[in-house]
Structure formats: C-alpha cells, structure tokens
Amino acid sequence: MGIIRAVTGSVGSVLEEQWREFFSCDAMDMDTLMRRGVKHVSAGSANTRRDDNVVTNGSVLLVADGQCVIAVSQGKVIDVCAEPGEHIFVDPAHPGGIKGFLSDVGRRVSFGGGDIQPVTHRIYYLNILECMNNVYYTPEPVPVRLADANTGLDMDAAVLLGGMYSYRVADPEKLYRLLIGNIGNVWRREQLTGQMTAELLSALGPALSQLAAQGIRPFQVPEHVPQLRDALRDEMSCGWCGEHGLEIVSLSLSSFRLLDAAALHSAQYAGMLRDESMAAAVLVEATAEAMQSAASNSAGRPFPAVLTADTAAEWTCSCGQRNTGKFCSECGMPKPSE
C-alpha cells in the first residue's frame, strides 16, 4: 500500500506542477540591489501548488527596464536575461512531455512521493540601474607619483580629494555567484557600497599616476575628471570589482588639494633652469631687478656693480673737474700717468 500511496502522491504532485507560472518583480528603488521574483496566482486559479520553488517549463518571467532576471536550478544559474519583455523559462535538465513527466514521477516515488520536491528552482531579479550618490573622501593622503617628461621631474607626492561616484552591475551572473548567492528575499545596496568605496580609494593612487604619465599636471586634475574616471575604471576592473561584475560609471570631484606644492614648484623650477636659454632669461630678469633696486637706493650711485667702459676711464683733475679724455676740459692739464 505504501508504494501505491507514493505513486499516487507523486502523480498528483507532478500534475500540479504542469501549470505555467507568471513571475515579475515590482519596481526596485536605488537601495535595493536584488529581490526574489514574485509568482502571481489569482484567487480563482486552478493552480493550487503550494511550493514556489518549482517552476514549470514555459513559464513567463516578466523583465522590466533596468532589471535582469536570473533563473537558478538546483543551486546553479541556468539562465540570465536583461532584455525587457517576456522571457520564457526553460530548464534544460528537466525536459517536458511524457518522458519528462514519467521521469519526475519516478524521482518523486524514490523520495516517498507526496510534496517532496527533488527539483528546486528560484527566480531572482537584479537591479542593473546606476547606483548614484555614493560619497568618497580620502581620510589620509593618497600617495601619487608625479612625472614630467619636459623637465625630467620624477617625485613622490600626496593628494587629498573627495566627491561622489556611481556604479552599476556589469555582469549579474558574476555578482550572484561570487557575492550575493541564495537570499531569502532582498539584498540591499548598503551591503556593497562600503566595499566599493574602499576599492575606489585604493585605486586612486595608481589612477592619478596614470594621468601623470599622460602629461597631465597635478593642478590640471580637476579639469580632467573624465580621464580620472577612465583610469579608475581600468584599475578597478583588474581587481575586486571586475571579479565581481561591477564597474564605475561616473565620478565627480568636489575637492582636490596637492600636499607639498612648494616642493613641487621648486623641483619644476630647478628642472626648467637646466635649459640654457631659460637659465639665461632668468639671469637677465634677475639682473634687471637688481639694477632697479640699486636705482631706487638713495644712499649711493645708481649702479655701483655695473660699470661701462666710459665710466671706467674717467679721471679727476687737480682742479676738481672730472674728465674722460687725455686733457682736462676745464684747465687743460694732461691726464696724470698711472
């Protein structure tokens, strides 16, 4: 009698599972990253199946804009779809028809029949819209290498910066398999953003060094935020974020301060003077400033350190007249021999 009850229960249970289901997910706000799909069954429906963990082949999964549906069978991802519209569920490991029906009945009988489900399916909806308004700032200076091919400058410096960034899920399957996994109902963004911010701060130094290698000077960084974002995206795609299917979308810079700017200026100035023409120009400028300073000095002659040829040949006669020729222009006395 036990085997008859098992067969009867198994046939009834499998017959109940032949009804197609309709799954969807309500609009997810920015703070909701993943949610289990909801099966819609009306009060007057003949589909009385109590288990939501079995989905019939041919069931409809409704995908809205900004959503990605993930179908899981026996704990393994079997389908991923981010195309808006109706998506038909098919489990390749459990075909339909008479053969599939008898296979399911036989499997149920081996487990004692009834409502025991040797096959499980789960439907998840993942939010692939841009997650915005994530604040970042550097609590400690970020080390960065500064390189300038024109002056040969190559030195270490540090910066403090902050702003906001946004990210999105680029590979839903990776994120599900490696990070989220099997959840009861909802997985929220706050469980991810802290790690994302830490990864961004770690990648800032190498990204800034990339900009320096491109010839972008430190004080020009606020003018090249798109390049900084692209450099961050490259750095983070090779690390934790890339491994988990995440990517940076946008970046804003609200504050930027280069530490030890005076040392940088001195190094750039010294590098500039290695060019002979630049060094000569600086020397001429310094000489002109010295002459102007001497000219404004009321205690002495205008240019005591700069003597012309005529000034060097002047001599004073015994009558007190200052002359430049061989004879005194006042009394006619000859220039004394030296």
Image: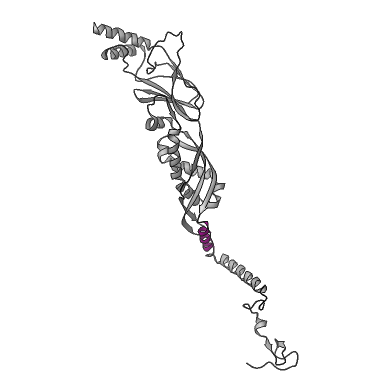
Image position of 133 with respect to 8: above or below: below
Percent position (x, y) of residue 319?
Answer: 72, 92
- What's drawn in magenta, residue-wise? 260-273
Q: Is residue 273 above or below residue 32?
A: below
Q: Name the image quarter holding the N terminus.
A: top left
Q: Position of residue 229 (x, y in %)?
A: 51, 42
Q: In the orientation shown, which residue stands out farthest toward the right?
A: 330
Query: Looking at the picture, does residue 323 appear above or below residue 121?
Result: below
Left or right: 300, with 129 as reference point: right
In this rendering, does residue 217 appear at all? Answer: no
Asked which quadrant contains residue 14, the reply is: top left
Q: Is residue 208 above or below residue 92?
A: below
The answer to whether residue 152 is left or right of residue 56 is right
Total count of labels: 0
Name the residue located 41 percent from the left edge and 11 percent from the top edge.
19
Magenta region, main secondary structure: helix
